Amino acid sequence: MNILMALSQKEITGAEVYAVTIGNELSRRGHQVSYVSDTLSKPVLGSFIKLQFNKRSLQRRVWQVLKLIWIIKRGKIQLVHAHSRAAGWASHIACSLTKTPMVTTVHGRQSVHPSRRFFHAFGYTAIAVAEDIRDQIILDLGVAREKVTVLRNAIDPEIFRPAPLVPLLGPIPRPIVSIIGRLTGPKGELCYQLLERILGDLATNSQIIIRIITSSAIPKRFEKFNAWILPSYPGDDILQSIVESHLIIGAGRVAVEALLVGRPVFAIGEAKSIGLITADTVDHALRSNFGDIGPKELDIDFDDVKTELKQVVELLGAANSEAALAAKISIDAVRSKIAQEYNLRDIVNQLENIYQTAVIDTLKREMPILMYHRFIAHESEKGTHGTWIHEGRFERHLQLIKRLGYETLTFRDLAQKGFIHRLEPGKKFLMITADDGYRDNLTRMLPLLEKYNMSAVIFIVSNETHNRWDTEYSATPDVRADLLSAEEIRALDASGRIEIGGHTLSHARLDELAPPQQREEIVGNKKHLEDLLGHPLLSFAYPYGYLNESAKSEAKAAGYRFAVATDSGPRALHQDPFQIRRIAVFPRTDTFGLWRKIRGNYVWRR
């Protein structure tokens, strides 16, 4: 996908680190990711366009929207991901005018005023990095609950690995206590209050060594703390500063990174104090992003903070401090919890799902999956059930597909590249499927696929020689049609154009069977075909499209990665890989009818 990350900032923030971290991972997965912001400090794998979102006059706002429209059009942007209020406002207008899907990650408390309640400017969905942020968006701003998703900051646990505590050195052994972050805004006010009320006394009394690591220009009121301030720059290794510390004081991303390294964290943020993070307090801390969000800003009793911090410092200075901390914090359990909640690859997987849903729902477009059965050449082969199409009409279908610029995918392609591959910019994809496994799929369908350089998925019934379910067990018997032999199935598989999928042993109606019988039909069919072909199957089709939750569970337990129905299941195919919608093609589906079915909006308009 072509994705635009939109930020508004004058100095490095957690939002930038978040955007760049997920953006670089998306780039590594093959997406084209661009960034637009006032500044950008961290190295990125995509392009950066400077735009001063923090200039907030009406004239500037209009210019920002116009510039974003130009960026979206020129870059063929498929989705905008905003990370701040100012960037989100301009992005929302630009996306509305260009009909571009948009999502917003909300990193902190939102200001509340009448215009904000009326004009949310979050786009398709708001992604909150913590539950308290989600609740504030819903309660204070009136955003519908279904429009808000909780998704943590994304952090690579392979980078932030556990490191042993540095021994306390010097004639007067003192632990290093570090605050990492901005000296401006609410974060700066918090830092100032901590230094003024608590940490300054502890340092003066030689109980701790203070380090304030910041990329901010140092405000005048902080000059009296200059001895403790260590300026940092975009290329500086903040991780090394965390490793060298014995205690990190802060909230948000810094707290998470420190916990992954194995450093104790005293969580205190823009809203409230959580205190020392232990196995007992970590769940509570997650809700507020380690103190960054709450009912009010800086709702903190600094006397209580001072008492608890003194206790932690005494613990750090003890002779057996590492063992004592391990017992008090349960650091391995805390780190395991954090690694699970903030895992970069899991977060980006979820983001890709959010992106796909936003694009599909906003544009009302989805990759069509066509369902055929038999291909006939003579009038005598027509049946009563409408599961056939003349090979001449099928060829005209392929000609239309080719003329309109579609490329065909199989489930093998989606397994290799992910569902999101179908949204590759500049491409139009569809999938051709055929049920039951008739002999004419080899003699009539395959030659036409080869002629037009297309592929298809054929779902095969493996324990029958012909369509007995239509000829012997139907109130309106159909004509007999032979199924593929073992050699013919191998020939289809060897063609390189056909993916073979499962379709039960006997074309059973699975919703009428008990789970053991469902399992026998699904697993037996899969084993038979895999033994025949010598490789695993990826996809399965429910006969008649009839299924229930048990049938879905059995298909998943059998080892399938995808299962298709007929006209049931979510409109967006990635939302339920085990109930994927298909579009039926009938004997009278002419080229105009097929055009309507493959435009992408058919399941919304039918």
Image (spheres, rainbow, N blue to C red):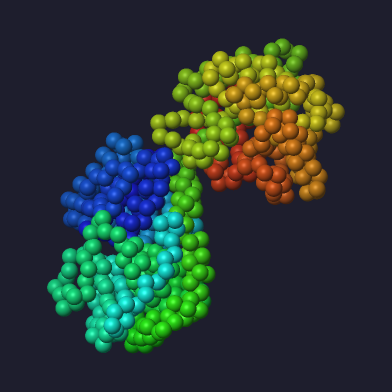
Visible residue check, residue 92? no
Residue in front for this viewpoint, 148 or 243: 243
Q: Is residue 488 above or below residue 215?
A: above
Residue placed farthest to the front in the image?
A: 171
Q: Position of residue 105 (x, y in %)?
A: 38, 56
Residue visible at 51% across and 22% down in the picture: 401
Q: Position of residue 237 (x, y in %)?
A: 30, 59
Asked if residue 297 lies left or right of residue 569, the reply is left
Q: How many marks?
A: 0
Residue placed farthest to the right in the image?
A: 472
Residue visible at 69% across and 48% down in the picture: 557
Residue visible at 76% across and 13% down in the picture: 380
Visible residue check, residue 33? yes
Quarter of the picture containing the N terminus is top left
Residue visible at 49% across and 36% down in the picture: 422
Q: Position of residue 440 (x, y in %)?
A: 70, 18
Asked if residue 298 lies left or right of residue 457, the reply is left
Q: Position of residue 228 (x, y in %)?
A: 22, 74
Please tell me in which quadrant of the rendered image residue 143 appears: bottom left
Residue in front for this viewpoint, 137 or 151: 151
Please tell me in which quadrant of the rendered image residue 322 appears: bottom left
Quarter of the picture containing the C terminus is top right
Asked if residue 80 lies left or right of residue 603, the reply is left
